[in-house]
Amino acid sequence: MLSDKLLSLLGALSKPERNRLRKFVHSPYLNEQGDVCRLFDVLDAALRKTSDKRPALDKNAVWAMLYPHRPYDDAHLRRLLSDLTQLTQRFLVMEWREQDPLSEALDLQRALERFDLPKHMVATERTIDRLLDEYPGKSVEYHFAQYRKHWNIFARASKQVATAGFSEKLVAADFHLECFYLAQKLKLYIDWLLYRGFRVSEHELPLVSGFWDYLNDPRFDEAPLIRIFQKIILCFTQIEEESHFEELLQRLNQPDSPLARTDLRECFFIAQNYCALKINQGNTRYYYRYFDLIKSMVDRDLLIENHQIPEAVFKNFITVSLGAGQYEWTEQFIHRYAEYLPSRIRENARIFNLAYVYFYQKNYERVIECLRDVEYSDVVYALGAKSILLRTYYEMGEQLALESLIESFRVFLLRNKVISKNLKREYMNFISLVRKLATIAPSDKKALDRLRQRVSQTSYTMPKNWLLKKLAEIEAGRRY
């Protein structure tokens, strides 16, 4: 079979992107190998004939299309494939650079130093100043660009005899380099705090002596991202002092935020992590704070990035919104935003999460309608769907359907080779607990105590709160 590395790269591009890539590959300045051009055309034609982003292509068949009268030469074909892969990667870099005109102008500023072209240099630096003035927020990239601009000017002046008036460029370069470094350092520190909040960390993130005091220098008030990051760090290092979180929200909710869109988006996600920690501590009030943050991101169009929503973000938003009791809003959210999920899991995620909403709404018929006949290609969604369906049959008192699903679920777990042993064990325990809930006698106090003890030892990976609630209902004489 043909190289999966190259096919997966080409298949990841949209048709308009591959059209531009064709011009790139066929450009004599960039590629003088006609065989590589023909190879691209063969592979592009194959991709256009199928919806599969990695079509199965035979090496010999591709060779025959390239060289109908030559014997197969594997080494030669592999070289062509490698050359086309490298060209495609260069194309991706060029496409990426064209999205950043400021970096391109800064590179031109540096390149023009080779020539004595003062008019061109003045025009380029005027363009740089304009792009910096238009830059959307003072991000770390903004400060690094400012550093590059001022350093390029100083470096050029230092090679000349007359350098008067340029020393302030060195001072400006130093300031913006500091802002870049400090903001990046704080960002890394926040990532470490978040990691430490959910996992055991054997490492400390080193900080130079006096780092925190140095940050309080009033000069850095001109870098709002540094001040926001300082507040975020206080939220996570003094988690019980909720006033830090309130102040953070005030800054994030400013109508004219000085932050770049990507930084503001990231800060909203970090604030949601704070809410998640509070929820894990048992403070369910933070479901509503978390939902407010979600709604703010949606209202301010901060959710979609590069025409996509990460699957984990989508799932978290739905879980939290349901926890906050926002059932109608959650259903509308799924209908509106599921199309931005990666195509590989889009339909699974849409159906599964709609069923999840209907389960919370106690609309059990619609849950069954969504899930009963769906075959999930993703094992995570398959497990989640079976778990919801199991609880649905229990809630409806459908004993025969419940017992049938328990048995088929058990067989599914035993036969599946993808699911880890630990996860299999947890799901086996869960279906055993559901079966026990469905059959235990409310009058058998000892059995109820033993069951409660088993449920209390259940991981929160499983629907532990639901199990506890159903157990309490049985003890109160209400099974369904």
Image (cartoon, rainbow, N blue to C red):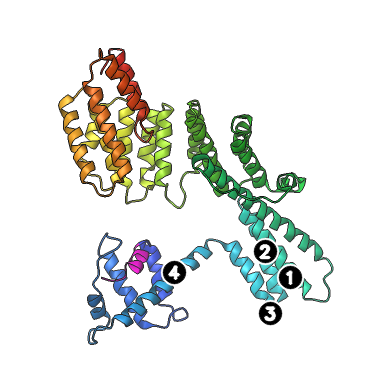
Comparing 45 with 139, the one in front is 139
Residue under label 4, please give it.
89
- Secondary structure, mark 1, is helix
215 relative position to 206: left or right:
right
Q: Are marks 3 and 1 in contact (CB under 8 Å)?
A: no
Residue under label 3, please give it.
115
Comparing 213 with 245, the one in front is 213
Residue under label 2, please give it.
148
* 260 relative to 171, above or below: above
Q: Which mark is residue 155?
A: 1
**Residue at coordinates 75% horizontally, 68% vertically from top-left?**
154
The earlier-in-sequence mark between 3 and 1 is 3
Give the quadrant of residue 13.
Answer: bottom left
How far apart are labels 1 and 4 at the CA level?
A: 32 Å
Segment tinted magenta in the rendering: 1-11
Question: Does the magenta stretch mainly form a helix, a strand or a loop?
Answer: helix
Screen quadrant of the C terminus: top left
Q: Is residue 409 visible?
A: yes
Local crowd at mark 3 within 10 Å, few (<14), some, or many (≥20)?
A: few
Amino acid at dot 4: Gln
Local crowd at mark 4 within 10 Å, few (<14), some, or many (≥20)?
A: some
The earlier-in-sequence mark between 4 and 3 is 4
Amino acid at dot 1: Ala
Give the quadrant of residue 127.
Answer: bottom right
- Secondary structure, mark 4, is helix
